[in-house]
Amino acid sequence: MKFKTAEIITGIIFLLYSALYIFWITPTYVTNALNDSSIQTIAWTLRPEALPNLNIGAFIFFTCIMIIQATRSKVDELVELSFNSSFKLLFIIACSFIYVALLPIFGFLTISPLFMLILVYTLGLRDWRYIIGISLVMPFLMDFFFYQGFQIILPEGQLWK
Amino acid sequence: MEIIDQIIQGMSLYFTFKAVLMVGIGVAAGILVGAIPGISGVMATAILVPFSFFMPPTEGIPFLLGLHKGALFGDSIPAILINTPGQPAAAATALDGYPLAKKGEAKSGIQMALVSSTIGDTFSDIVLILAAVPLAALALKFGPAEFFALMLMGLTIIGGITGSSAAKGILSALIGIMIGLVGFDAVTGAERYTFGIPILQGGVGTIPLMIGLFAVSEVLIQAEKSNKLLSKRPDTAHLKGGKNLKLKEVKTSTRTIIRSSILGTIIGAIPGTGAAIATFIGYGAAKRASKKPEEFGKGSYEGVAASEAANSAVAGADLIPTLTLGIPGSATAAILMGAFLAQGLRPGPELFEANGATMYAIFALLLIGNPIMIVVGWVLTPIFARVVTVRQSLLVPAVLLLCLMGVYVYRGNLADIQVALIVGVFGYLLRKIDIPLAPLVIAFIITPIAERSMKQALILSDGDFSVFLTRPISAGFLLVAVAILYFGFRRKTKNKKSE
C-alpha cells in the first residue's frame, strides 16, 4: 500500500471515530451518565465534557490537515507490510490475548512455557534444543526473580488451587 | 537557611548505602536491557520502571535515576557491536562505532561511548541543578491560567516539532489527551469514558500505556522481520579480543565531548526536540571541527564521542522542564514523571516547596550516579554485551513475556495486560504511518494537571474562556504556541517543495 493512501485511510478512520465520539461515546458515557443534577446547571466550560469537546474539535481539524497534506503529497513510498508478516503478527497478537485469558486458569508457570514455545517457533527458530530450553528456562527464571526479588507472586492458576 | 536545611534533610534521607546501591542496580539493569538489540532506552525504561513500585521512595527514586542513565548508554552497545541502533539517536553512534568494532576495537569503542556519555550526562546534570531552582521559582508565580497556557505551549512545541509532520505530532498529542481524559473529572468528580469497566475509573494505567506503546509495539515491529533474519545468529566474530581505551584517545576527543555536551544540553532543554536531532548536530559539528574529518564514518573515536556525549546531555536537560514545570521533554522523561508520580512526587514548580529535601537529594544522586555509571559500565559491559550474540527469535518472545509480566506486577490485574496489548497494537499502527509516540505519552501524562489548571482558571473567571487571552503572560504563551504551529506547518511545506 502507498504511504499516502495509508495516511488518507487513517484520516478517514479518525474522522469516523470522531463522529462516533461526538454523537455516541460522549453523550452516552459522559453527558447522560451525570447523576449529579447540579453539574447540569454549571457553565459549559466547567462541565466534564468541555475539554473532550474542545479536544475532538482540534482532532478533526488536524485530521483534515493530514488528509489534505496526504492528497497533495508526491512521495510514493510504500508502507512496509507483507501478507506473510501481517499473518505472523495477527497470529502473535491472537496468541498473546489467548495467553492472557488462560493465565488465571492455568497459571504462569504452566502456560508461559507453551506461549514461549509457540512464539519462538513462529519467529523461525527450528533448533528444538534452544526452543525447549528458552521456553522452560525463561518463565521459571522470571518467576524466581519476581518472587525472590520483590515477593511478587505471578498468577498461580485456579486449576491448581 | 531553609535551602541548607532541605539539603541536609535530603542527604540524611537518601544518601545511604542502600540508595547508592540502588543507583548502581538501576544503572546495571538499564545497561543490560538497553543492550538488547532492538530495545531503545525508552523501551528499557518502560520495561524496568514497574520494579520501582515495589520499593520505598528512598530506594525507588535512586533506582529510577540509575536506570535513566544506564538505559541511555546501553543503547550504544548493540549500535557499536552489531550495527543495530535501538533508536535513531544511537544511529549516529553506529556510524563510527561499528567500523571500530569491525577493526577489532569494539571494547575501546564502547569504553569511549561510556566515558563521553558520562561526561555529557554530568554536564547536563550540572546545568539542570543550576537552572531548576530559578525556573521553578518563576513558574510558582504563575496562576492557573498561565500554567494551562504554558502546558498548551509545551504540548504544541512537542507535537509541532516531533516527527515528520506537525499535523501528525499534534494529532498524536490530541490522542494522548483523549486517553488522559478517561476516568474521573478532577473538578466535578463525574465519570468519563469508563464504559462501565471498573479498572478505567482511575484512568488508563500509566505503565500499561507506556509498555504497550513503546515495548509491545516494538516487539511487533521486530516480529515483522523475516524469519530468516530473526533466527540468524548475529555475526560476532569481529568482537573477540580488543584493547582498552587509552587516555590519549580521550584527550584527543575532549573538545568534541565538551562541544557535544553543550549542544545536547541546549537542544534537550527544548521539549520535544529529542536526542536524535542533538546527536546528529553534535556529530556534524564534530566532523566539521575535526583535524581528521576523513576518518569520520570509518571508525573515528571522535565520532563515537560526539554522538554519545550529545545523546546523554539531552537526557539530563530533558529533566529541566520535567522537574521544574511538570512538562516532560521526551518520552523517557514522561515515563520517569509517571514513575515519580507513583512514588508520591509530583514534578512541577510546587515540588521544590512540597518536597524540597527530596529534590536536592535527586540532584545529588544524579551527580553521584555518573561515577557509578563509569564503574558499573566499565566492569559489566563486557558481560552484558554478550546479549547481542543471542538470536532475535529467542529475544523477542522473552522480551514480550517480560513486558506482559511487568504490566501485571504494576497493579496485579490481568486487565492491565489486555490494555497494554491493545495499546501495543494501536502504537504499532501509529508507527506504521509515521505518527510519533512521544507527544501522545507526554500529553497523556500532563492532561490531568492541565485540565485542573484550566478549570481553576475558569472557575475564577466564572467560566469565561477569555481569561486565557486577557492575562498577558498566558496570552504570550498562547501566541508562542500559535507561532510554533505556523512554523511547524511552514517547515512541512518547505520540506515538500524540496522533495
Image (tube, helix red, strand yellow):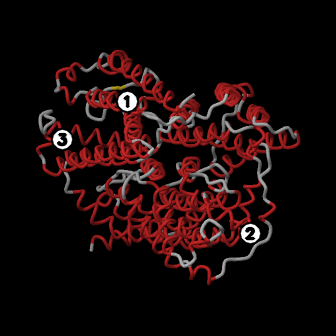
Q: Chain of mark 1?
A: A
Q: Tag 3: residue type?
A: Ala
Give the residue number, with chain letter if any, for mark 2. Answer: B103
Q: Position of residue B243 (x, y in %)?
A: 74, 76
Residue B256 shown left or right of residue B322 in the figure? right
Few, some or many C-alpha atoms within 10 Å of disc 3 (few <14, some 14-19, many ≥20)?
A: many
Whole-Å distance between the Cαs marked 2 and 3?
62 Å
**Depth check, front residue: A57 or A137:** A57
Q: Nearer the viewer, mark 1 or mark 3?
A: 1
- The residue under label 1 is A68
The C terminus of chain A - image quarter: top right
Q: Nearer the viewer, mark 2 or mark 3?
A: 2
Q: Amino acid at mark 2?
A: Lys
Q: Which residue is mark 3?
A: B457
Image point (66%, 62%), residue name = B80
Locate residue B81, reporting x and y percent.
Answer: 70, 61
In this rendering, position of residue B325 left or right of residue B209: left
SS label for mark 2: loop
